[in-house]
């Protein structure tokens, strides 16, 4: 079978850009960045179609962050149907192993071959349809999941790119360097670096405290000739929003589907009222610009405008 005829290649042929979000270590807010990236890409255009695939198989958190806990995956004649965060609009689809667990607190105890099979099924069996962007939230580090992703998506490698998430402290930066080394080893283009938890903004007075130091990501970007997409401080509004996103149980969701009731996508409106949304806007603009440059689409600004000055 030719490479462009594989089940994965056929399924992903209508996806323009695939963005792999990765980090060198856990606890740096990679999943929250993935969720914000998907929400911001969705809001970037009234016609943008976005998918988010959660391949953090042992710690799936995207369903919770998007308020989708309790939903189940539907099977169609064309494959699995993504769970749509925006209901009938069907512009923001999500797939996660969290939708397949009987109880959300159940653990996933799988060895490498079963993880590989699950990722292959996610890539070959999910009916994404036409997407402008597919955001893939990966586990921390460089593990079996990352190798499986790149192996299965080899036929669409030209549409792959990565965003690296780190925090400013030295330990996180050391692990982020390992993540960068991995992307270079497998020839995965890096759109840029996001420094998360870059200080803490007091919700009362607005004073910024550098809890984890600051500027480490900027220095790493300068030394490695990467684009620093942006720095994000700890935002208590965002933490509350993503941690307490309302979710519908499966019976309620099924009842609404059977009666044709439209679900209101409130999360995007709530997110856009947070300070993180305003800080993330130039980040997503940088991502879109870098993708346009890599695909040869003309842009008003050049890639060099986004580079860290040496």
Image: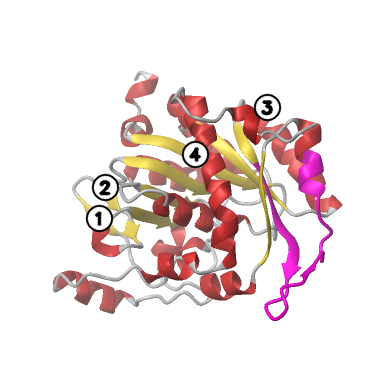
* Mark in front: 4 vs 3: 4
- Distance from Cα at disc 4 to Cα at disc 3: 24 Å
Secondary structure under the numbered disc 2 in the rendered image: strand
Secondary structure under the numbered disc 3 in the rendered image: helix
Residue wearing tag 1: 75
Out of 295 and 176, give the one closest to the viewer.
Answer: 295
What residue span does the magenta drawing correspond to? 193-220
Residue 15 in view here = yes
Residue wearing tag 3: 185
* Mark in front: 3 vs 1: 3
- Residue lying at 45% horizontally and 63% vertically, measured from the top left: 98
- Residue lying at 37% horizontally and 40% vertically, measured from the top left: 132
Out of 174 and 235, give the one closest to the viewer.
Answer: 235
Q: Are marks 4 and 3 in contact (CB under 8 Å)?
A: no
193 sits left or right of 154 in the view = right
**Residue 243, position in %: x, y?**
55, 73
């Amino acid at each position: 079978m030719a490479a462009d005829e594989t089940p994965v290649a056929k399924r992903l042929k209508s996806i323009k850009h695939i963005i792999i979000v990765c980090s060198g270590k856990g606890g740096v807010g990679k999943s929250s960045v993935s969720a914000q990236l998907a929400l911001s890409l969705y809001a970037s255009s009234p016609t943008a179609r976005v998918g988010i695939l959660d391949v953090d198989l042992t710690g799936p958190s995207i369903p919770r962050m998007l308020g989708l806990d309790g939903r189940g995956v539907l099977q169609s004649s064309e494959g699995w149907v993504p769970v749509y965060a925006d209901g009938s609009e069907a512009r923001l689809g999500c797939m996660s192993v969290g939708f397949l667990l009987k109880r959300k607190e159940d653990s996933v105890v799988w060895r490498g071959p079963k993880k590989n099979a699950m990722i292959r099924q996610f890539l070959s069996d999910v009916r994404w349809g036409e997407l402008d962007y597919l955001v893939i939230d990966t586990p921390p580090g460089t593990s079996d999941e990352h190798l499986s992703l790149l192996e299965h998506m080899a036929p669409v490698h030209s549409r792959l790119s990565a965003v690296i998430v780190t925090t400013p402290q030295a330990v996180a930066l050391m692990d982020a360097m390992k993540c960068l080394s991995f992307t270079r080893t497998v020839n995965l283009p890096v759109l840029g670096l996001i420094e998360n938890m870059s200080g803490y903004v007091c919700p009362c007075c607005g004073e910024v405290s550098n809890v984890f130091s600051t500027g480490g990501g900027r220095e790493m970007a300068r030394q490695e000739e990467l684009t620093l997409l942006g720095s994000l401080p700890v935002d208590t509004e965002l933490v509350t929003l993503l941690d307490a996103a309302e979710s519908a149980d499966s019976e309620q969701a099924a009842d609404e589907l059977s009666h044709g009731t439209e679900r209101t996508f409130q999360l995007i409106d709530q997110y856009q009222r947070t300070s993180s949304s305003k800080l993330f806007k130039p980040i997503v603009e940088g991502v879109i610009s870098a993708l346009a440059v890599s695909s040869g689409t003309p842009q008003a600004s050049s890639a060099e405008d986004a580079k860290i000055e040496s």
